[in-house]
Structures are given as C-alpha cells and as structure tokens.
Image: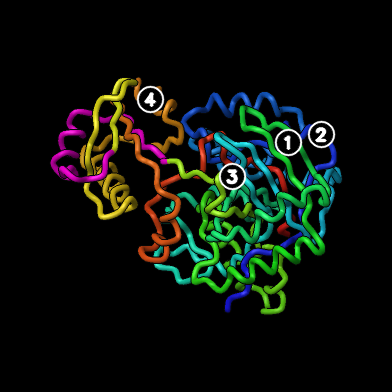
C-alpha cells in the first residue's frame, strides 16, 4: 500500500494588510484580457499583495520572464524580512469558497513530488490530468528556482465518493480556529479558512491513508504546468542531496488545494479555443473535410461575435475529440503560416474576442466529472487545456504561502 501523498505542513499567512488586496487570481487566467491585470496592478501597486510575487501570463511577450522572476523573488524576500507572516505549524487549512452556483470545499496542504509523475502513461500515485507542454515550463521554473516561498494556485482531486476526507470538516468548523473570512477582488466570491491541526489533522491523515490503497490517489485538476515545473526543479535539487537530506527537504513538496471530485462545488467547465489571424471560411471548410462525421461530438463555432453554427467532430472519447481539434488547429496554422491560438475559459470573453477580423472561436462542451479518474487510469492524460474547474473567476486565488528554501 502506498503512503498518502498529501500531508500537513508549515503554512504561512500574512498578519498585516488587507486580505482582499493580498489575494489575487491564478497567473494563467485572463491571458487575453490584459485590462484585467492592469486593474489588479493599479489596485495593488503600493500594497502588500501576492500580485508582486507572481508572473501574470498576460504580460508574457512584453516583459522579460527573468525580470518578472527577479521582481517576484525580491517581493517574497521583502515579506520575509518584514516578518509579515504567521506560521501555522504542521497544519492544513480547510477552505470554503463561494463560487458560481455554490460552495467549494478544499484542504490546503503539501503534495509529495516524489509521488507525482506527469508523463502521459504514468503509473504513479499522483498523475497529471493533461499533457504537459515543455515550452510552458521555463517561465514557471524561472519564478520558482530562486524563490524563498511558493504560493499555490494548484488544485488537485481525490476520488472520494464516501466523502471521508474533506467533507467531515464542515460541521467541525465551530471547533477550529478561523484564519480568514473575506471577499476576493474582481468578483472572485467569498472565502473562509480554518486551521486544521492536532487531532483533526490526524483524522484527515487516516482517511487519506485509506484512499492510498487505490491505484491513483490524486489527479491534478488545475495548475498542471506549475506542478510539473516544481517537479523538474525538485529533480534537479534532489540529484545533489543524500537520501536523508532529500527525505526532509522543503522543495520535495508543493503547496496545493485538495478537493473531492464529487464535491458539488467542483464543476468541470470547458476550455474554449480562439484562433486569431486566419481565413475563417477556409479553415472551416478544411475542418469539415477532415474531422466532421454525422454522429460526432458536437461543438459550436463563432465568427464575428455571433454564434454561427455547429460541427460534429470525430473522436472516440471527449479527450480524443479535443486532441483531434487541437492537432488540426496547430497543423493548419503551420500549413498557412499564420494563426495564433489562445485558450478562453469564459464564453462571453470568447464571443467578444471573435469580433476581431480573421478570428474564429470554438465553444467546447463540458466533461462529465465522473469520467475523470476512469479516463486517466485507462487512457492517460487529456490533451492540453481540455477542461477547467469552474469559471475563470472561480479559479484559485493565491493566499497561503510556504517556505521552499
């Protein structure tokens, strides 16, 4: 039987400043809506905020990743020097987040990177849910390699139909220490967190030990590439350590939020595609020739800011259909020498973006979440950007921290 790959750890929380200003959304959100991040930057300019410790991907291509990494690392060091954190020793944080359509419950703790393998046919206890794109790792690694702290936007999932790990904490919150309770900026909803330590943490550990008997303990939901970057850097670090040093080194672990895939607050949202700089009619014509079949899986395409039609695409599975669509877009762009694809979580944002000339959007259907673990076990990882947990504003915000040096 495998040991649980998730455990309590020393968690840092700020004791000064406004928590709404402190907590900002995951860096890989709103990548085509720079105005979102411009608002956040203006709001947080002279405030204590995780904004200064991350690399918003909306700015990639206009700002050097090295410069942004150095700025982020300097902000982390400044927070440590100013002693703005309280340490919660050997703890989890139980989180209740009000999201679109309900409440999502989670548990923040440390994930063992030695139990994780993101390769497509992994047999490890912790597995990726989507294919890792090597080109997406360097900026994330640049931030982490010299960082004294980590801030998680990674969400991981357990297959716990009996609701034995996270859910029993809800009726026990009266006996737990409340750590924070505030509204998240930019319409992110409300979030409350409680410290879980001592006997309550031991109960969680026992429940996790029972789940460790399964072939797959944990599947990564959000933040696959950030966790892969942490894994690569840990492999580099571990190569220079003795087994005894590696066993207790802080970089062996990554701070994440763990959720039960059966939590009603966990909703799998599709990740749509928008393609800029192409002849949309020629692209559609070729797509119909190569991918469309009468009984295929249905998607919608959008041109000119209006929903224009539907396609039925080949694919034995949900992931297989996305794989074919993704490959077609990439091959078409290479063939004609133009075309840039972006991944959009919000349907309204996609429709607005397709108002630009020579732009087409593809609206994908949502995946039944009960299929996640079955697919990962049977077929390996999904294609990149196959699904998302919740709407864009429901993504995890940076909040808790942990020392990794």
Judge left or right: residue 209 versus residue 80: left
Disc 1 on helix, strand or loop?
A: helix
Q: Which of marks 2 and 3 is nearer the N terminus?
A: 2
**Residue 148 visible at all:** no
Which residue is located at x 50 percent, y 67 percent? 216
Q: Do the residues under discs 4 and 3 have CB atoms within 8 angstroms?
A: no
Structural crowding at the residue carrying mark 1, measured as other residues with C-alpha within 10 Å and reported as few (<14), some (14–19) or many (≥20): many
Gap between marks 2 and 3, in whole Å?
Answer: 28 Å
Query: Tag 2, which secondary structure?
Result: loop
**Residue 157 image position (x, y, % from top left):** 55, 56
Q: What is the distance, in whole Å, between disc 2 and disc 4 at their CAs?
A: 38 Å
Front of the two marks 2 and 4: 4
Q: Mark 4 points at which residue?
A: 351
Residue 71 placement: quadrant: top right
The image shows residue 303, relative to residue 6, as above or below, that is: above
**Pointer 1: what residue?**
22
Local SS, label 4: helix
The number of numbered discs placed on residues in the rendered structure image is: 4
**Disc 1 vs disc 2: Cβ atoms closer than 8 Å?**
yes
Q: If you read the primary sequence from the N terminus, does the residue marked by circle 3 or circle 1 appear first?
A: 1
Q: How crowded is mark 4: few (under 14 residues within 10 Å), some or many (20 or more)?
A: many
N-terminal label among 1 and 2: 2
N-term-proximal mark, 4 vs 1: 1
Q: Does the magenta stretch include residue 54?
A: no
Q: Name the residue under label 2.
A: 17
Magenta residues (range)? 270-298
Q: CB atoms at circles 4 and 1 under 8 Å apart? A: no
Give the labeled residue for mark 3.
66
Q: Earlier in the sequence, mark 4 or mark 3?
A: 3
Do tag 3 and tag 1 residues touch (Cβ < 8 Å)? no
């Amino acid at each position: 039987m495998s040991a649980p790959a998730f455990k309590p750890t020393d968690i840092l929380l700020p004791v000064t400043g406004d928590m709404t200003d402190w907590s900002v959304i995951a860096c890989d959100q709103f990548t085509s809506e720079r105005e979102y991040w411009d608002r956040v930057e203006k709001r947080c300019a002279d405030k204590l905020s995780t904004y200064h410790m991350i690399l918003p991907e909306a700015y990639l291509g206009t700002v050097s990743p090295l410069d942004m990494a150095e700025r982020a690392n300097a902000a982390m060091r400044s927070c440590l020097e100013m002693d703005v954190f309280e340490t919660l020793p050997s703890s989890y944080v139980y989180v209740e987040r009000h999201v679109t359509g309900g409440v999502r419950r989670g548990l923040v703790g440390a994930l063992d990177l030695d139990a994780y393998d993101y390769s497509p046919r992994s047999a490890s206890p912790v597995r990726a849910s989507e294919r890792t794109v090597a080109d997406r790792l360097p900026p994330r690694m640049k931030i982490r390699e010299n960082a004294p702290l980590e801030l998680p936007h990674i969400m991981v999932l357990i297959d716990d139909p009996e609701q034995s790990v996270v859910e029993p904490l809800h009726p026990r919150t009266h006996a737990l220490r409340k750590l924070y309770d505030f509204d998240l900026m930019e319409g992110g909803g409300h979030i409350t967190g409680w410290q879980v330590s001592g006997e309550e943490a031991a109960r969680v550990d026992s429940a996790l030990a029972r789940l460790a008997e399964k072939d797959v303990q944990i599947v990564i939901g959000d933040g696959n590439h950030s966790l892969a970057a942490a894994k690569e850097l840990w492999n580099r670090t571990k190569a220079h350590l003795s087994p005894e040093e590696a066993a207790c080194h802080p970089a062996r672990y990554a701070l994440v939020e763990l959720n039960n895939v059966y939590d009603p607050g966990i909703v799998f949202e599709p990740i749509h595609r928008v393609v800029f700089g192409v002849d949309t009619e020629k692209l559609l014509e070729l797509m119909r020739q190569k991918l469309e079949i009468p009984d295929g899986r249905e998607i919608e395409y959008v041109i000119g800011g209006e929903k224009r039609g539907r396609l039925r695409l080949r694919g034995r599975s949900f992931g297989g259909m996305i794989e074919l669509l993704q490959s077609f877009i990439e091959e078409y762009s290479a063939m004609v020498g133009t075309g840039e694809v972006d991944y959009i979580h919000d349907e309204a944002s996609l429709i607005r973006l397709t108002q630009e000339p020579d732009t087409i959007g593809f609206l994908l259907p949502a995946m039944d979440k009960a299929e996640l673990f079955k697919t990962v076990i049977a077929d390996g990882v999904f294609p990149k950007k196959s699904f998302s947990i919740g709407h864009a504003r429901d993504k995890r915000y940076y909040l808790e921290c942990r020392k990794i040096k």
